[in-house]
Image (cartoon, grey):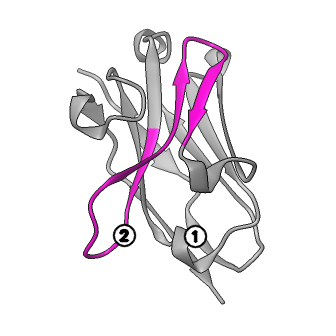
C-alpha cells in the first residue's frame, strides 16, 4: 500500500516561506513522477509542481521562481520549498505519486493534505 504523509504546513504572513515535506516509502520515491497540488476552498484542485525522475521539474506559471520541488531518496521524502508566499497561495497542499505531470486526475496515490495559510 502506498502511503504519502505531508507535513510542514502552517500560517505565515505575505512574503514568508514554508517548506512542505511528503514522506513515503522507498518503492514510492523512485516512481517516475511525484507531484504537489493544492485546493483552496470553493475551487478545483490545481497543479503546483511536478518532479519527473530525479531532476526534471515542472511548475505552474504562478509558482515559477517562488516554489521549488525536490526530493531526497535517502530520506524517502519529496519537498516543496515555497518562498514569497501570497494570500492567494492559501490552500490545502497535497502530495501525489504516479501520474502524468501536472494533471491531477491521473495520479493514483494521494496524501491527506497539509494546510497553508498566508495572511496579508
The image quadrant of residue 42 is bottom left
Which residue is labeled 2 in the image? 40
First in sequence: mark 1 vs mark 2 = 1
Whether residue 75 is visible, yes or no, is yes
Q: Is mark 2 on a helix, strand or loop?
A: loop
The image quadrant of residue 118 is bottom right
State the count of labels. Answer: 2
Relative horizontal placement of residue 7, taking residue 38 as reference (left or right): right
Circle 1 or circle 2, nearest the eye = 2
Relative horizontal placement of residue 113, taking residue 36 as reference (left or right): left
In reply to whether residue 86 is colored magenta, the answer given is: no
Q: Is 96 rendered above or below residue 1? A: below
Q: Is 94 rendered above or below residue 24? A: below
Neighbours of disc 2 within 10 Å: few (<14), some (14-19), many (20+): some
Which residue appears at 50% of the width and 33% of the height? Answer: 23
x and y percentages locating residue 93 in the rendered image: 44, 55
Q: Is 74 rendered above or below residue 90? A: above
Q: Is mark 1 on a helix, strand or loop?
A: strand
Query: Outermost residue toward the front?
Result: 61
Which residue appears at 62% of the width and 15% of the height? Answer: 73
What secondary structure characterizes most of the magenta part? strand
x and y percentages locating residue 5 in the rendered image: 42, 41
x and y percentages locating residue 116 in the rendered image: 52, 68
Q: What stretch is highlighted in magenta?
A: 36-59
Amino acid at each position: 500500500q502506498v502511503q504519502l504523509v505531508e507535513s510542514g504546513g502552517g500560517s505565515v504572513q505575505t512574503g514568508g516561506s514554508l517548506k512542505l515535506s511528503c514522506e513515503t516509502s522507498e518503492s514510492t520515491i523512485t516512481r517516475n513522477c511525484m507531484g504537489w497540488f493544492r485546493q483552496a476552498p470553493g475551487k478545483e484542485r490545481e497543479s503546483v509542481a511536478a518532479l519527473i525522475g530525479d531532476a526534471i521539474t515542472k511548475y505552474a506559471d504562478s509558482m515559477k521562481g517562488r516554489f521549488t520541488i525536490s526530493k531526497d531518496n535517502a530520506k524517502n521524502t519529496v519537498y516543496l520549498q515555497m518562498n514569497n508566499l501570497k494570500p492567494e497561495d492559501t490552500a490545502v497542499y497535497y502530495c501525489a505519486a504516479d501520474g502524468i505531470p501536472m494533471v491531477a486526475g491521473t495520479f493514483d496515490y494521494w496524501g491527506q493534505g497539509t494546510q497553508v495559510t498566508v495572511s496579508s
